[in-house]
Image: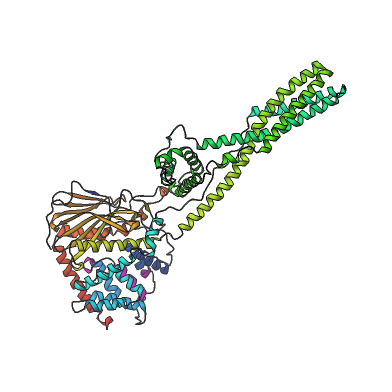
Amino acid sequence: MTTHSTSNIAQGNAYVGVQANVMTGDVHHHHHAPPDPSSTPQGEFEAGVRYLDRFLLDTARKHIERAVTRGYPITARVQFYRLVALLSGRTPRQLEAEEWRRLLTIWSDPPNLDERDEWTLGLRAILRLLNADDTATPKAVTKELESLPPRQQGYIYNHLDGLLEGALRNKLWQKAVAQAQQHQTAGNRLDRAWKFFHPMPIPPRTRKAAPAVIAMTDRVKVGTGGALLLLATGKLTVLLAVNGEIGGLVGLYGAMAGLAAFGVAGADRHFRHSRRRAKDSELRPPRRQHTDARPGGFAGKIDRLFTRYFARYVPEGMASAQWLAETAGIRRHLRNEVVDAYREERVDAERVAWLVRYLAGDVRTRWTQGTLTAYRQELRAPLSTWLLQITGAITLTTGLLWAASAVFSAAVLPGTLWLALTVPTAITATRAAFRIVAERRRVVADNAYRTAEQARRMEAYHRWMARLADKPTDTEMAAWLECDRKVITDRALQQFRLQPSQVVAHAFLESPARSARKRRAADGPWRYTHYRLLLFLLTEDGVRQIDLELDFRRAAHRDTQRLNYRFHAISAVRIDGLALDKPTFHLTLNSGETITVQVTGTDTDPTERNDDPRPVTDLTLDASGLRQTLHVLEGVAAEGKDWVRHRREQADDRLAELSRRTSGLLD
């Protein structure tokens, strides 16, 4: 294979914020597994199996080996998982001396092997892979693997594709890639992967109805005016009765009845008018188009959510800018309601995104159906109210004139004084009563609206929760990502025209892309919607490198750069910042160029600011395989091409020793 010089390897001071997939070496980092129920050896072992299924290999090895140390019975199943965890993702030449000793220890005291047991079949298959030589044909190895039960076969294809050499390795790799392609979008990934990154929706809330606010002056006007009106009515009644003005009494009390009818109808009309005016104000564009909310604060994030979703949910045939202008008022009103209802410490705005989306869609639907201003029709005064008010006004006027005529004929001076007190007092008290009644009815109407709106929002919440019910588990996410890695690696091999047997080791460096969203399970590492990947393929001639971007939700990737350089181009490899839990990887070339890698998993969740970030960082580093990749590149930087030769010789000697010790197990 033709190799290339180191020129044009890294332009300028290349910076890549990444997470490594296959690194190790003299990296001493504390492992803090998240809390788990592994209080017993069995629980410890099962936790290790779960971590293995999520490709958290360091954590899986630790739990499985600790379970054995604590006395968990050694069975064929236990030994199978111990081997898979130990050998996963590596070739025999990548194992360290301590790991070889552990491998020999696992085989030194084998459990009772039942030929009919699926785990025994799996153990024998792994041993045959380790002992396979040039006499073993790809067809025979493939046939044996295909005869395995599906579970054991899956573990071998997913974890142990690097155990073989030559044509056997090429054949096994083809089968592993075929399975990866088959499972890459399994489980309806394209429709479900996005749900992993969606935060748990918070239940809906509606703003509580403001309590009635009645001005003290209105209370005084109604109280004082009502008292004076009763006093004046009583004096006029006595005056008219003493003078035998029966007609005047009828007119006086007819006027009072008319006033009552006018007041009832007028209060209803006043409430309807004031409520319509308040509803109209919700639709009216605000005078200030911008808020003082901090961009990074809760209110600022809610602002952006409303803008985003209203720009997305646009009526057909209308431009987005026009729709945003048309709905500026209702958008601001709803935004203020959401902010008031949810503004509290440590509430993630993304948890409210579903509600903002529902409100935006609801406004569009009501606008399309013509019901956005339906309240105007609902709040129109009915004919009965108009008739009652008109009748009351006529009765009031007629009765007042009739009573006044009788009063003037009976006692002009005192009667005029009491009438003069009655009219302005009634007007003042009636107006104040209108405002009081309207405010109290406003509270009743607001509560009724809140109850109905809360019911509608709760229905939308349940619909959204039902849609998120099949949210992927972290195990599924890890399996999909591993399939992506295999497919990407296979494509790189084809691009560089390499066979898997020509690759000494491969390594991924992974980082979230700038537009990536992140999320993690309660006991898992960070996962990202978009990754930026660097793939290193180490061959006996040098290094092939591909820079690419992965859209995880769509299982799609694209290359951005391809490089080739020899081993001697690598000057130094190191990792800094471990003590601060902010590991940064540095690859320095002889040309002076440096690839700097900010390892992912060091970022924290703002809702967990008081929690120790190291357990999450460790899990994310474990998922990345940082230590293994670092070890490979450190060896190449220190020994160059001799590293490949030394590793091959050591692996051959150790495999020969393993074959001698386990020769009887394959008979």
The foreground one among 481 and 630 is 481
The image quadrant that residue 568 belongs to is bottom left
Q: Is residue 6 visible?
A: yes
Magenta span: helix, strand or loop, mainly? helix
Judged left or right of residue 436, residue 464 is left
Residue at image location 19% in from the left, 49% down from the top: 594
Q: Which residue is situated farthest in the top direction here?
A: 413
Image x and y of residue 321, in percent: 40, 40
Question: Percent position (x, y) of residue 348?
Answer: 44, 47
Where, by quadrant of the figure, is residue 76 drawn?
bottom left
Total numbered labels placed on residues in the image: 0
Q: Position of residue 160 (x, y in %)?
A: 28, 69
**Is residue 658 toward the left or the right of residue 612 in the image?**
left
Say left or right for 17 vs 204: left
On-image quarter of the N terminus: bottom left
Residue 218 image offset from top left, x and y in percent: 65, 28
Give the answer, above or below, for where 482 lies relative to 211.
below
> Residue sitting at 39 percent across and 72 percent down?
72
Segment colored magenta: 67-96
Q: Is residue 88 shown in magenta?
A: yes
Point 42% across, 61% down: residue: 36
Instruction: For residue 661, say whether it is visible.
Output: no
Dividing the picture into quarters, in which one does residue 378 lie? top right
User: Depth check: 39 or 623 in front?
Assistant: 623
Q: How is the image coloured?
A: rainbow
Q: Which sits in the foreground, 135 or 546?
A: 546
Q: Quadrant of the C terminus?
A: bottom left
Asked if the stretch drawn in magenta spans residue 8, the answer is: no
